[in-house]
Image: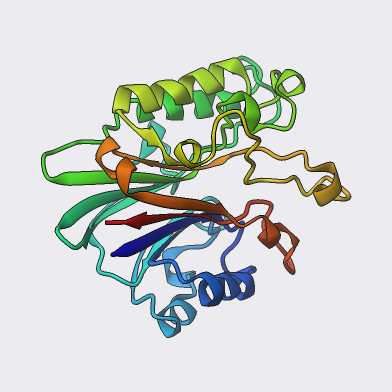
Amino acid sequence: MTFSISTWNINSVRLRMPIVEQFLVRHKPDILCLQEIKCQESEFPLQPFKDLGYQHVIIHGQKGYHGVAIVSKIPLLEDHRQNYCGVGDARHISAIFERGSRRVRLHNFYVPAGGDEPDRTVNPKFGHKLDFVEEMKALKADPMPGISSVLVGDLNIAPLEHDVWSHRQMLRIVSHTPIETQGLKEVMARGGWLDLMRQHVPESEKLYTWWSYRSKDWRVADKGRRLDHIWSSPDLGPFLDHIEVLKEARGWNQPSDHVPVTATFKF
């Protein structure tokens, strides 16, 4: 039995629905997790997803900002939204799904970007990001017997040396500063999470999921960062078949600056 989960910061689902449909028609993941949908739940374009077989949808939306959604070909149970930092942003949603004899809790996150200045004393956005990551440290990969876990999303941190185009030059840039990378590593360690992308691609190899809009020729410059992640509880690690980072999507019509990442499992 094969099973696939994709994650994609789409940077406005309504604006980029044509390329979402293009992706789903070509790649057909069983579940797609979207971040930064930038719409309220009533505005989410449900029908195009249902027309493509994604009948099960849960949404945590917000007017014009943030927002996460899960669309699935299989039923989604126990919809839950966590209000991280108590500010009411739509940045998390989770659900349980069943595949064969397995029950899996799926978390979909959109971690705050953190602004441009890596100093919480002058940049409240950076402080918000650090506080959000601190709260994530309580999230366990094995919260109860009989339930596995998968965590996906735009975590807005590239934690490893080869998750950015230049480790040395990025050390003072938000997304790769030591306080952020150490924080995300602690989320993984304390929660018992397995980094599936780095299980598939060695840490010594460059791996990116985001290329800035500011680059005139992003493909030639290739100054990317791995901001999008797929983690799991350790019990799912042996069943990972492969990870695909769809770099070509960065060059599609009206693209997001992030590309889809898909994990495929064989049980």
Considering only vertical position in the picture, is 5 above or below 112? Answer: below
Residue 207: x %, y % from top left: 62, 39
Q: Report whether 226 appears left or right of 218.
A: left
Residue 89: x %, y % from top left: 45, 44
Considering only vertical position in the picture, is 154 above or below 57? Answer: above
Considering only vertical position in the picture, is 167 above or below 197? Answer: above
Q: Nearer the viewer, residue 131 or 56?
A: 56
Residue 168: x %, y % from top left: 74, 18
Query: Which quadrant, please, contains the N terminus?
Result: bottom left
| Total numbered badges shown on the rendered structure | 0
Q: Residue at x 55, y 22 (%)?
A: 180
Res 247 seen here = yes
Residue 22: x %, y % from top left: 60, 75
Q: Residue at x 44, y 85 (%)?
A: 51
Coloration of the structure image? rainbow
Q: Nearer the viewer, residue 180 or 220?
A: 220
- What is the residue that sits farthest to the right in this orientation? 216
- What is the residue that sits farthest to the left in this orientation? 145
Q: Residue 61 occupies which quadrant of the picture?
A: bottom left
Q: Nearer the viewer, residue 113 or 76?
A: 76
Q: Report whether 229 appears left or right of 11.
A: left
Q: Residue 266 occupies which quadrant of the picture?
A: bottom left
Considering only vertical position in the picture, is 2 above or below 239? Answer: below
Query: Which quadrant, please, contains the C terminus?
Result: bottom left
Res 36 seen here = no
